[in-house]
């Protein structure tokens, strides 16, 4: 595992964009796995800057988002589809039909989850998966206790995650209690993974993920088995690590 420690959130986004841009150069078409939340915002800002500067072309990029709330229409301002349009897709030359977010309004959720997984496999898999991490070690919406081999499916959110995400809603009761999420097994199939984390409030989760045992209590710890994972984290987030790391 590669651990890159950066001084702030802006550097975190730039460094992650560098890693992905380097990989994009090797392929004529590229499949990205994308995350929502506040963490990847600096990465998406950097993608937009590079796209506008003519340094990064999204016309042959296909994306698959990690997760979506069950019961929120794509037009709902807290849906992850809305978030992605607002923060990335509407600002780069990506074809909207090549952007995929799980369908939280599907009538048959199980079938739509299987279909999502199949689409990823049929396109040849994800070239680069972007991840954030929850304070409890979750990735996507794979909460503690999730099967480490899980594929895309519906999950019930923990009270901790609902409380953490309540800041984006008017009140806690408005936060959906379920979500569709790619599984940990889906993430493990990605060719490369970059996990971003910033802030002292993520230091415990990052420590457990990197230096704790591989265990479903910390879903991100499964990445210890991945062949190509890079953590790009801020100094305050790395404060508890004992492993050697690169400093940028
Ligand atoms: C959310 C998302 C995750 C995200 C995490 C951290 O619940 N489902 O994909 O990584 O929580 O969010 P933030 O980046 O806002 O701290």
Image (tube, rainbow, N blue to C red):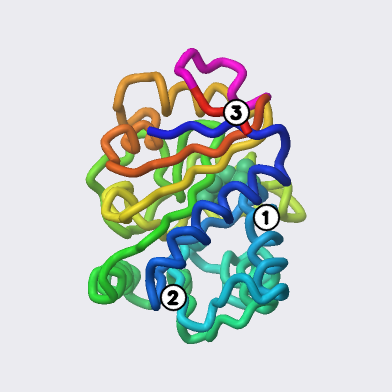
Q: What residue is drawn where x is 58% and y is 76%?
A: 74
Work out which quarter of the rendered image holds the N terminus and state it.
top left
Q: Quadrant of residue 46?
A: bottom right
- Asked whether disc 1 touches disc 3, contact meaning CB atoms under 8 Å apart, the reply is no
- Residue 130 coordinates in the image, percent (x, y): 48, 53
| Secondary structure predominantly adopted by residues drawn in magenta | loop
Q: Is any atom of residue 69 visible in this view?
A: no
Is 29 or 156 nearer to us in this picture? 29
- For the residue carrying disc 3, how many other residues have a C-alpha within 10 Å: few (<14), some (14-19), or many (20+)? few
Reading the image, the residue beneath label 1 is: 41
Mark 2, residue position: 62
Quarter holding the C terminus is: top right
Q: Nearer the viewer, residue 112 or 200?
A: 200
- Residue at 61 percent across and 68 percent down: it is 84
The residue range painted magenta reads 236-244
Characterize the local packing of mark 2: few (<14), some (14-19) or many (20 or more) Cα atoms within 10 angstroms.
Answer: many
Q: Position of residue 141 (x, y in %)?
A: 45, 49
Q: Residue at x 46, y 71 (%)?
A: 63
Q: Within 8 Å of ligand 1, the CB of disc 2?
A: no
Mark earlier in primary sequence (2, 1): 1
Q: Which residue position is annotated with label 3?
A: 247
Separation of marks 3 and 2 at Cα, in angstroms = 31 Å
First in residue order: circle 3 vs circle 2: 2
Picture quadrant of residue 82 = bottom right
For the residues carrying marks 3 and 2, which lies nearer the camera in this image? 3
**Mark 3: which secondary structure?**
strand
Observer able to see residue 64: yes
**The quarter of the displayed image where residue 175 is located:** bottom right
Q: Earlier in the sequence, mark 1 or mark 3?
A: 1
């Amino acid at each position: 595992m590669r651990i890159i420690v950066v001084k702030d959130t802006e550097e975190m986004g730039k460094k992650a964009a560098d890693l992905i841009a380097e990989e994009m150069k090797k392929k004529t078409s590229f499949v990205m796995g994308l995350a929502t939340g506040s963490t990847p915002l600096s990465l998406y800002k950097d993608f937009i800057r590079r796209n506008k500067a003519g340094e990064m072309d999204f016309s042959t990029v296909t994306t698959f988002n990690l997760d979506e709330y069950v019961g929120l229409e794509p037009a709902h301002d807290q849906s992850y589809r809305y978030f992605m349009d607002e923060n990335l897709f509407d600002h780069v030359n990506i074809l909207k039909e090549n952007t995929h977010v799980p369908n939280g309004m599907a009538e048959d959720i199980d079938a739509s989850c299987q279909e999502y997984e199949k689409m990823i496999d049929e396109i040849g898999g994800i070239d680069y998966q972007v991840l954030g991490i929850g304070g409890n070690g979750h990735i996507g919406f794979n909460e503690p206790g999730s099967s480490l081999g899980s594929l895309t499916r519906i999950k019930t959110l923990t009270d901790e995650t609902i409380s953490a995400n309540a800041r984006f809603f008017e009140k806690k009761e408005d936060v959906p209690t379920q979500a569709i999420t790619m599984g940990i097994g889906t993430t493990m199939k990605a060719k490369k993974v970059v996990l971003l984390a910033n802030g002292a409030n993520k230091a415990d989760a990052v420590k457990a993920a990197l230096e704790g045992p591989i265990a479903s209590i910390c879903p991100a710890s499964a990445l210890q088995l991945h062949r190509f994972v890079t953590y790009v984290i801020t100094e305050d987030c790395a404060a508890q690590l004992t492993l050697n790391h690169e400093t940028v």
